[in-house]
Amino acid sequence: MPDEVLRRVLGLSDELRRFNAVIHSVLHSHHPKADVIGPLLWAAAQSCDSVNKLAYYGKLRDCFSLGRCVWETLLNAAYVHISGDEIADKARKHALQKSYRDLDRSLEVGKARIDMKANLQLNPTAIPGLEVTCPRFMYRLL
């Protein structure tokens, strides 16, 4: 890897440390939307870390896909931050039902199938707010 590229990649590590400090302060603040914005920032930081690692090994093409995810996630966080409480509530509801759905994921491409399932037996009605948050989604689960 050329020295200039390596220097820039290593500089990203410093930026990530600063970004993580910002996330920590948001998560521990008493801001009314911290519970929505904090996880979005954390997700963006995780993807930034992946970009950093891929860039270090010269996998720049893959960095573009992750970079777009980072951009979209940060844009969503900014939108929630500047919008009213109604948007933050919708984001909370979306995150709640998505976190449950993500416990059992699958992907099919042609004849290949990949399944990821949590080793948990959770009853969706036992999760506070899930049933009220998304009744149409609950109907499909039960």
Image: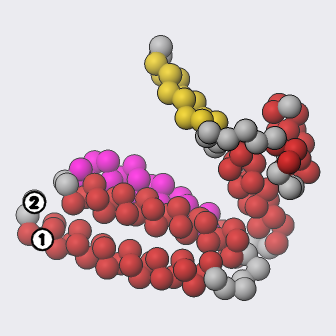
In reply to whether residue 53 is colored magenta, the answer given is: no
- On screen, residue 76 versus residue 8, left or right, reads right
Task: Give left or right: position of 6 versus 95.
Answer: left
Q: Residue at x 31, y 63 (%)?
A: 52
Q: Nearer the viewer, mark 1 or mark 2?
A: 2
The residue drawn where x is 60% and y is 35% is: 117
Please identify the dominant SS of the magenta region: helix
Marker disc for residue 1? 2
Q: How many marks?
A: 2
Q: Quadrant of the C terminus?
A: top right
Out of 87 and 134, give the one closest to the viewer.
134
Give the label on residue 120, or none.
Answer: none
Q: SS class of the residue under badge 2?
A: loop
Q: Position of residue 127 (x, y in %)?
A: 82, 51
Residue position marked by numbered label 1 in the rendering: 4
In the image, 139: left or right of 84? right
Count residues near mark 1 (Cα–Cα under 10 Å), then give few for <14, some for 14-19, many for 20+. few
Q: Write down the region rendered in magenta.
A: 59-77
